[in-house]
Amino acid sequence: MFQFKPAAAIACARRAGTSASIDVLNKYFTISQMPIVSSTYWNTIHGNNLEETSQDEEGMQTMYNLGKNMAWMLKCIEAGKNAGIKYPENAKKHTNFIR
């Protein structure tokens, strides 16, 4: 259902744990064949509430760059569609390693 739709995981926390959260979320995107949009650092922002997160200048810059990158990827996908580039058709085999 989400195949070929760009995705970006974002995590917000008071301190630690954001990179592990992003890693887990990105795995769901990859098994759904979703291109992952990245930024200039991990897509994280820190703070206890909205006011504190807006004080995280590096986090805010990362989110701004992420938004620009997402917009760019969406435009590229649309340009590809307009140029007649079709999504790849993928075959999928299920293998059972229990013998």
Image (cartoon, grey):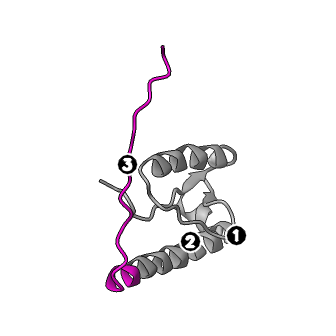
From this view, report whether residue 79 is shown above or below residue 20: below
State which mark lies toward you, 2 or 1: 2
Q: Position of residue 64 (x, y in %)?
A: 57, 76
Q: Callout 3, which amino acid?
A: Ala
Instruction: Say which element carries label 3.
Output: loop
Query: Distance from label 3 to label 1 (Cα)?
Result: 42 Å
Place residue 16 in its image quadrant: top right
Query: Distance from label 2 to label 3 (Cα)?
Result: 31 Å
Residue on which disc 1 sits: 58
Residue at point 34%, 72% (across, down)? 86
Magenta-colored stretch includes residue 65: no
Q: Is residue 65 left or right of residue 70?
A: right
Residue at point 46%, 61% (across, down)? 7
Crowding at dot 3, Cα within 10 Å, few <14 / some 14-19 / many 20+, comes out as few
Q: Is residue 39 left or right of residue 99?
A: right
The magenta region covers 78-99
Residue on which disc 3 sits: 91
Q: Callout 1, which amino acid?
A: Glu
Instruction: Say which element carries label 1.
Output: helix
From this view, report whether residue 48 is shown above or below residue 17: below
Rendered image: mark on residue 18: none
Judged by its main secondary structure, the magenta piece is loop
Q: Callout 2, which amino acid?
A: Leu
Crowding at dot 1, Cα within 10 Å, few <14 / some 14-19 / many 20+, comes out as some
Residue on which disc 2 sits: 66
